Amino acid sequence: MKYRALLFDLDGTLTDSGEGITKSVQYALEKLGKPEPDLQKLRIFVGPPLMEQFMSYASLTEEEGRQAVAYYRERYTPVGLYENKVYDGVPEMLRELKDRGYLLAVASSKPTVFVRKVLEHFDLLSCFDVVIGSEMDGRRTEKVEVIEAALEELGMQDRRDEVMMIGDRMHDVEGARKASLSCLAVSYGYGSMEELTAAGPAAIAASPAEVAAFFA
């Protein structure tokens, strides 16, 4: 077995979280006086670090970006977190990989407290040896920082050739590359094929079953 540990992104890779994220972004933008009626346009918020995405999308200052995140959490914490569903085949994929002896981790730019709540809500937490996200105060939001923290928790910092990242956006591929890891991209999430192909992952899987087959 070439790989020993697999790091999974959460949003767009394990769960289809777009509804809760986009509606909470819409809520925040409305409160900032920058309303966006088209939820489809807000799908780009699924995956990347939230504050940076707010700043880029709405031309906000850093201070305004922090306020946007605070508004976002007003809706996301009680409601948006649960406007979410597990992709078909994900529980089976995780069980199969676990049964084969892989170490499994979640490495997400979402705050760890939210990551754990989502995994608990969908009864997936027990599948993972390590769960790493960002900090609520905005620290550790860059993908490479999350990946490095996961590697440390797993004790795999010196065995990077035995670790692979799995994610649905270019940020996962680029974060993995910065951490000297290879990345398996998934095309069923929120990144387009154009985005993923341009990012240059090791391979692209079209379903959770294909992810499991890749590591067979």
Image (tube, grey):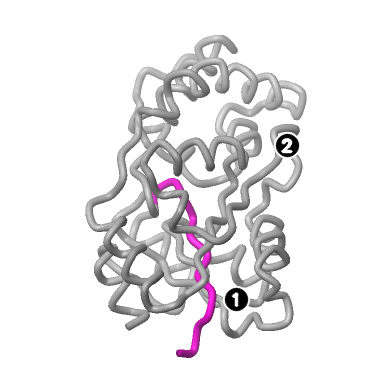
Chief secondary structure of the magenta span?
loop
* Residue 115, x across and y down, in percent: 53, 42
* Residue 27, x across and y down, in percent: 48, 15
Q: Amino acid at mark 2?
A: Gly
* The image quarter in which residue 156 lies: bottom right
Instruction: Tell whether position 187 is magenta.
Output: no
Q: Amino acid at mark 1?
A: Leu
Task: Say which of 175 and 54 sits in front.
Answer: 175
- Which of the two discs, 1 and 2, labels the residue nearer the N terminus? 2
Vertical placement of 197 versus 46: above or below?
Answer: below
Task: Say which of 99 and 23 sits in front.
Answer: 99
Vertical placement of 112 versus 30: above or below?
Answer: below
* The image quarter in which residue 112 lies: top right
Residue drawn where x is 40% and y is 69% of the image: 98
Tell which residue pokes out farthest to the bottom in this image.
Answer: 1
**Start-end of magenta stretch:** 1-12
Residue drawn where x is 48% and y is 38% of the image: 45
Q: Is residue 167 left or right of residue 174?
A: left
Q: Residues within 10 Å of mark 2 (few under 14, many from 20)?
A: some
* Residue 191, x across and y down, in percent: 39, 54
Residue drawn where x is 52% and y is 23% of the image: 77
Q: Which residue is mark 1?
A: 181
Q: Quadrant of the N terminus?
A: bottom left
User: Mark 2 falls on what kind of element?
Assistant: loop
Q: Which residue is mark 2?
A: 138
